[in-house]
């Protein structure tokens, strides 16, 4: 089985909030370490890297109008059946994005502070990018909401970054 390198391009709002004339000279924000770790755990959890290794993770995104107001994260992708269609074979997904809402994890420090939920959420979103729809089973990682931490993947706990509480 071919192994794909996961490509992560995280863009923090701070990096793009610069005058247009200066934008070209400003380097992109370094991908926050918790995002790198959470996405590698997510790939290990599923035993697969979605989207042929090309997943863009974007922080601090404004919530799309059609999503519930308390959505922390969501995915977008193209597929053989059109945009964001989980009925399409996951191998056909391209232009994959995991977007994190603006309010929950605005900084790398907040990601570390809220590590367990970030790691669960990233695993959940990777599940979508591998073609998994929501599960009605409580405590399943594909459940649409996490009332607690019972569905937290073991790897999120064992590989918790230093200085992360819990
Ligand atoms: Zn979901």
Image (spheres, rainbow, N blue to C red):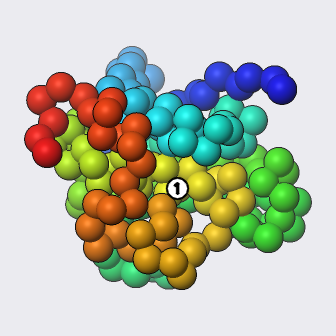
In this rendering, does residue 92 appear at all? Answer: yes
Question: Disc 1 beta carbon < 8 A from ligand 1?
Answer: yes
Q: Quadrant of residue 111?
A: top left
Q: Residue at x 84, y 51 (%)?
A: 92
Where residue 69 appears, x then y in whole percent?
A: 33, 79
Residue 57 vertical position relative to residue 8 in the rendered view, above or below:
below
Assign a secondary structure to mark 1.
helix
Q: Is residue 67 above or below residue 92?
A: below
Q: Residues within 10 Å of mark 1 (few under 14, many from 20)?
A: many
Front residue of 84 and 146: 146
State the image coordinates of residue 80 (x, y, percent, origin top left). 88, 60
Q: Is residue 19 above or below residue 135?
A: above
Occupied quadrant, residue 25: top left
* Front one among 93 and 119: 119
Quadrant in which the C terminus is drawn:
top left
Left or right: 80 in relation to 29 = right
Q: Residue drawn at (26%, 67%), measured in percent from left and top? A: 148
Q: Which residue is mark 1?
A: 125
Residue plotted at (84% across, 58% down): 89
Q: Position of residue 1 (x, y in %)?
A: 83, 26
Q: Residue furthest right?
A: 80
Q: Is residue 23 visible?
A: no
Q: Position of residue 60 (x, y in %)?
A: 33, 51
**In the figure, is residue 92 to the left or right of 138?**
right
Residue at 59%, 55% in the rendered image: 127
């Amino acid at each position: 089985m071919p192994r794909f390198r996961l490509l992560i391009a995280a863009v923090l709002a701070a990096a793009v909030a610069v005058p247009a004339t200066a934008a070209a000279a400003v380097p992109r924000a370094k991908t926050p370490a918790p995002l790198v770790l959470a996405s590698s755990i997510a790939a290990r959890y599923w035993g697969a890297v979605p989207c042929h290794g090309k997943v863009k993770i974007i922080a601090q995104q404004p919530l799309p109008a059609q999503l519930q107001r308390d959505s922390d994260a969501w995915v977008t992708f193209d597929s053989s059946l059109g945009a964001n269609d989980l009925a399409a074979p996951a191998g056909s997904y391209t232009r994959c994005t995991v977007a994190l809402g603006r309010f929950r994890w605005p900084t790398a420090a907040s990601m570390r502070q809220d590590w367990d939920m970030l790691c669960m959420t990233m695993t959940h979103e990777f599940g979508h990018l591998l073609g998994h729809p929501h599960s009605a089973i409580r405590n399943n990682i594909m459940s649409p909401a996490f009332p607690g931490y019972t569905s937290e993947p073991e790897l999120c706990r064992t590989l918790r970054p230093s200085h992360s509480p819990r």
